[in-house]
Image (cartoon, rainbow, N blue to C red):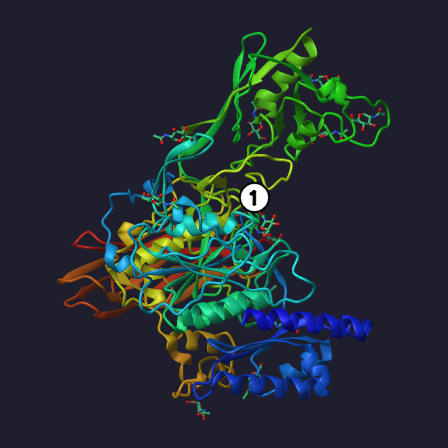
Amino acid sequence: MILSFASCLLCLATANFVQGSIENERKPYIVYMGEVPEYGARISVMDEHDMLLSKAVGDENIARESKIHSYGKSINAFAARLLPDEAKRLSDEDGVVSVFESSKRKLLTTRSWDFLGMPESSNRNAIVEGKIIVGLLDTGIWSGSPSFNDTGYGPPPAKWKGKCDKGANFTGCNNKVIGARYYHIDNYGPNPDEPTPVDTDGHGTHTASTAAGIAVKNSSLYGIAKGTARGGVPSARIAMYKVCWSDGCSDMDVLAAFDDAIVDGVDVISLSLGGASSDFFNDSVAIGAFHAMRKGILTSCAGGNDGPMLTTVENVAPWILTVAASSIDRQFTSLIKLGNGMMTSGNGINTFSMKTKMYPFTNGAHATNVSGNYYGNVSACDAGTLGENKVKGKIVYCLGNSGQDYTIRMLHGAGTIMAVDEPTDYYFLTLIPATIVLRNKTGDRLDRYINSTKDPQAVIYKTRTVRMKAPFVASFSSRGPQLTNLNILKPDITAPGLNILAAYTKLNTVTDETIDQRYSAFNFMSGTSMACPHASAAAAYVKSFHPDWSPAAIKSALMTTATPMKIKDKYGELSSGSGQINPARAVHAGLIYDISESSYISFLCKEGFNSTTIDLLIRGKQKYNCSSFKPALGFDGLNYPSMHIQLNSTESIISAVFYRIVTYVGLRNTKFTAKVTSPKELSITVIPETLKFTRKHQKKSFRVSVKGGSMKNGTDILSATLDWRSNKGHSVKSPIVVFKQQP
Ligand SMILES: *[C@@H]1O[C@H](CO)[C@@H](O)[C@H](O)[C@H]1NC(C)=O
Ligand SMILES: *[C@@H]1O[C@H](CO)[C@@H](O)[C@H](O)[C@H]1NC(C)=O
Ligand SMILES: *[C@@H]1O[C@H](CO)[C@@H](O)[C@H](O)[C@H]1NC(C)=O
Ligand SMILES: *[C@@H]1O[C@H](CO)[C@@H](O)[C@H](O)[C@H]1NC(C)=O
Ligand SMILES: *[C@@H]1O[C@H](CO)[C@@H](O)[C@H](O)[C@H]1NC(C)=O
Ligand SMILES: *[C@@H]1O[C@H](CO)[C@@H](O)[C@H](O)[C@H]1NC(C)=O
Ligand SMILES: *[C@@H]1O[C@H](CO)[C@@H](O)[C@H](O)[C@H]1NC(C)=O
Ligand SMILES: *[C@@H]1O[C@H](CO)[C@@H](O)[C@H](O)[C@H]1NC(C)=O
Ligand SMILES: *[C@@H]1O[C@H](CO)[C@@H](O)[C@H](O)[C@H]1NC(C)=O
Ligand SMILES: *[C@@H]1O[C@H](CO)[C@@H](O)[C@H](O)[C@H]1NC(C)=O
Ligand SMILES: *[C@@H]1O[C@H](CO)[C@@H](O)[C@H](O)[C@H]1NC(C)=O
Ligand SMILES: *[C@@H]1O[C@H](CO)[C@@H](O)[C@H](O)[C@H]1NC(C)=O
C-alpha cells in the first residue's frame, strides 16, 4: 500500500515538472462521497472515483495524473489535484457529498491520573482492558520507550487487523504497541522526513503513553516531578497512525488514517490535532469521526490552543468528544538568590543545577554594545543588541519570554531571568539555567538591584515542584461558543493538559532545539494535545466496563459525571464544558443520554442536509425522510448531555425547550429527581421532575424549558445546572448555558 503511494508520488512529481505552470494551479482537494457502498468491493469504488474524475477533468490522461488517492475501506472519498471549476463540477455530481481543499492541521502541544481520582490501585477490568485498542493519529511513536515495554502482555486481541510498517530508526511493534503505520500521500512536495512510523518529534510518544503507557517508576525529567508515570488504561494496546510530519498534518493523511483505523479494530481514536473548524463534511476530522461513530468507535479530540479568546474551539462535530485543558495541582518554581542574600523565586522548568555559588548578574542595558537609534530592544535582550564580552559567564535579566534563553545561550551567558507583565500558566523548558518572574512583583526589584549595586550577583536553583490550587482551565485552552452548531455546547469536557510529564522520543532533544544536548525518556508538554489522550483513555476505561455502550453513551457518562470546575473561569462552561473528567464515576453513570444513528440523522435534517445527502452518508437499507422528523426535534435537535442557547446580538428573549431521553444503566429500582441550580435571570422547568426506573436499559423522556427576559448588556453568559439525583447516590449533571453575543 505505502509502496504504491511512494511510487505514485514520484510519477506525479515528474508529471508536474513536465507540465509546468498550469499544473501548479491545481490544488489538492478531497472529494467526499459518504459511506462505502456495501456491494462495493474496493476496486469498484476506485473505478467510480476514476470515472467521476475523468468526467470532471475532461481528459483521461490529466485525470490519471491528477488523482492522488482513493479511500474506500471505511470512507468513500478520493483525493485529487483539481482546478476550482473542476472541483465545482464534481460537487454537483450525484453521489458527491462535498468537495473541499485539503489543508494542513497542526499539533496542539505523573501525577495527573492520581489527581483525577484514579490511583494506580484503582478498580480495573484488566482482562477486558487488555482487549481495548487505543488508536492515535499523531507524529508516530518511539516504541523503545520504557512506557511501552510489553513484558507480561499477551498477543494482540484477535479482532486486531492492523499493520506495523517498517522504517528508519523504528524498533518495531510489540504486544503493547501493536500497530504503527505512516501516511504521507500529500505529495504536494517530497516528504521532508524519512518514511517511517518512528516519532522524531516527541508529541506522539507523549500522547500515546498518556493514554495507555505502562506504569514506569522513578520517571522524571532530570529529577523534576519524580514519580510513577503511567497511562490511563495501562493494560490497553496502542495503535499509532503517523499523519504529522515536520511540514504539518495533511487532511488527506488524516482521512487515510481514519479509513484504516476504523477497519483495523481500534476502540477509541485519539486525535491531538487542530485546524479551523468548518462545515462538518468539509472537515476531514468530522468526516472520519462520523464514520468511526457508525462503527461504534468514539473519537476524542483536542479542542484547540487558541484561548483565552471566545469562539476559538475546534473539532466541534457533535459526534466528537471535544477536550479542553486544565491544570493539575503542581507548580514549578526555581529559587533565585542574590549577592546581598535576598531570596526570591520564579516559575518555569529549569533542569540545570548551576556549578558555582554566585554569578555576575547584569541586564540588557548594562550588557549592550550598541547605543542610540539602534534596531532592537535592549531591555528585552534582542539578538544583536548585546555584546558577547558583556554577557559571557553572567546571568542576564531580560524583559519578555520569547527566546531570550536562546540569545543568552548563543552569547555564552550563564543564565537568564526573564520578566513578564502577565502571569502565565504553562512553561517551556529553557536551554540554559533560567526562570520567569513577574515584572511588577519581582522583576523591577531585581533590575533595581542590578542598577544600584557595584558588583551584582545571582544564582538560579534547579526547579522543584510545589502544590497549588487546581484545577483551572489553562489560559491557552480554546473557548466556545462554537460557530458551526450554535446550540451544541463545546468544548465538552476538561482534562489535564498543563505541564504533563510523559514518555518522549529519544530521537529529539527535550527542547526540540538542535543546539540542545539533553535527551530524556520523559518530558513535559502542555496543550489540549495532552488533555485529549487523558479523555481518550477515560473513554477506553469506561468501555472496558461497558463494552456494549455506544460512543455517545460513553461520552455521556464522561460528561454527566464530570466535576464542574470550582475555580471559575471568566467564561465558565464555554471554557470547561461539563467539567473535569472523573473516569471512576463515569463507570457508574446511572443515566445515559444516548444518541442513535437516527438521532444524528434527524439532527442533520435540522441542520439542512437533505435526504439525498443523508442516503450517501449512511447508505442504509432504510431510507430517511427528513420531513418525518420535524415535530420531535426540539431546540437543538439532539439528545446531547449538555444544553446550550446562543443568542445573537439583537435577540433579547431567552426561550427554548430541550427534549431529552435518558436510558437507565443501573441495576435495581431507582428514582431520580431533577435538581436545577440556576441564576435568577433564568426560569427553568423540567417536566416531569421525577423519573422512576424498574429495570436496566429502560428509557424515559423529559423536557427542559428555559426562559428569561432580556440579558443585560455586558452579561454575555448565564450558567445553570440540571442534576438528576437518585436515591442510590447518582448525580447526573448537565450544564445549561446561555450565551449572548455582544453588540
Ligand atoms: C466547502 O469547501 C468548498 C471548496 O473549498 C467551498 O466551495 C464550499 O463553500 C465549502 N462549503 C462549506 C459549507 O463550507
Ligand atoms: C522490560 O521490562 C522487563 C521487566 O521489568 C525488563 O526485564 C526488561 O529489561 C524491559 N525491557 C526493555 C527493553 O527495557
Ligand atoms: C531514579 O532516577 C534517577 C535519575 O533521575 C537515578 O539517579 C536514580 O538512581 C533512580 N532511582 C532508582 C531507585 O531507580
Ligand atoms: C554587538 O555584539 C554582537 C554579538 O556579540 C555582534 O554581533 C554585534 O556586531 C555587536 N555590535 C556592535 C555595534 O559592535
Ligand atoms: C522593550 O520590550 C519590553 C518588553 O516587551 C517593553 O516593555 C518595552 O516597552 C520595549 N521597549 C521599547 C523601546 O520598545
Ligand atoms: C502586577 O500585574 C498583575 C497583572 O497585570 C496584576 O494583576 C497585579 O495586581 C500587579 N501587582 C502589583 C503588585 O502591582
Ligand atoms: C535600570 O537601568 C536601565 C538603564 O538605565 C533602565 O532602563 C531601567 O528602567 C532601570 N530599572 C529600574 C527598575 O529602574
Ligand atoms: C535515523 O536513522 C538514519 C539512518 O538510518 C540517520 O541518518 C538519522 O540521523 C536518524 N534520525 C534520527 C532523528 O535519529
Ligand atoms: C440536496 O442537497 C444537495 C447539496 O446541497 C443538492 O445539490 C441537491 O440538489 C439536494 N437534493 C434535493 C433532492 O433537494
Ligand atoms: C416525506 O414525508 C413528507 C411528509 O410526511 C411527504 O409529504 C413526502 O412525500 C415524503 N417524501 C418522500 C420522498 O417520501
Ligand atoms: C438574530 O436572530 C433573529 C432570530 O433568529 C434573526 O431574525 C435576526 O436576523 C438575527 N440577527 C442577526 C444580526 O443575525
Ligand atoms: C445595550 O446595548 C445596545 C447597543 O449598544 C443599546 O442600544 C441598548 O440601549 C443597551 N441596553 C441597555 C439596557 O443598556
Horizontal side, residue 576 vs residue 119: left or right? right
Q: Is mark 1 within 8 Å of ligand 8?
A: yes
Quadrant location of ligand 9? bottom right
Horizontal side, residue 157 vs residue 251: left or right? left
- Observer-nearest residue: 309 or 722? 309
Tell me the quarter of the picture where residue 492 sits.
Answer: bottom left
Q: Position of residue 719 (x, y in %)?
A: 41, 51
At label 1, counting other C-alpha atoms closer than 10 Å, the crowd grade (few under 14, some 14-19, many 20 or more) is: some
- Observer-nearest residue: 617 or 245? 245
- The tally of labels here is 1
Q: Is residue 534 visible?
A: no
| Disc 1 target residue | 508
What residue appears at the point 47 percent right and 63 percent down from the top-left corner? 487
Depicted 397 relative to depicted 650: above or below: above
Depicted 191 relative to depicted 345: above or below: below
Depicted 360 relative to depicted 591: above or below: above
Q: Position of residue 654 (x, y in %)?
A: 46, 60
What residue appears at the point 86 percent right and 27 percent down from the top-left corner? 373
Q: Position of residue 214 (x, y in %)?
A: 35, 47
For the C terminus, the quadrant is bottom right
Q: Is residue 54 visible?
A: yes
For the N terminus, the quadrant is bottom right
Mark 1 lies on a secondary structure that is: loop
Q: Position of residue 439 (x, y in %)?
A: 61, 25
Q: Amino acid at mark 1?
A: Asn
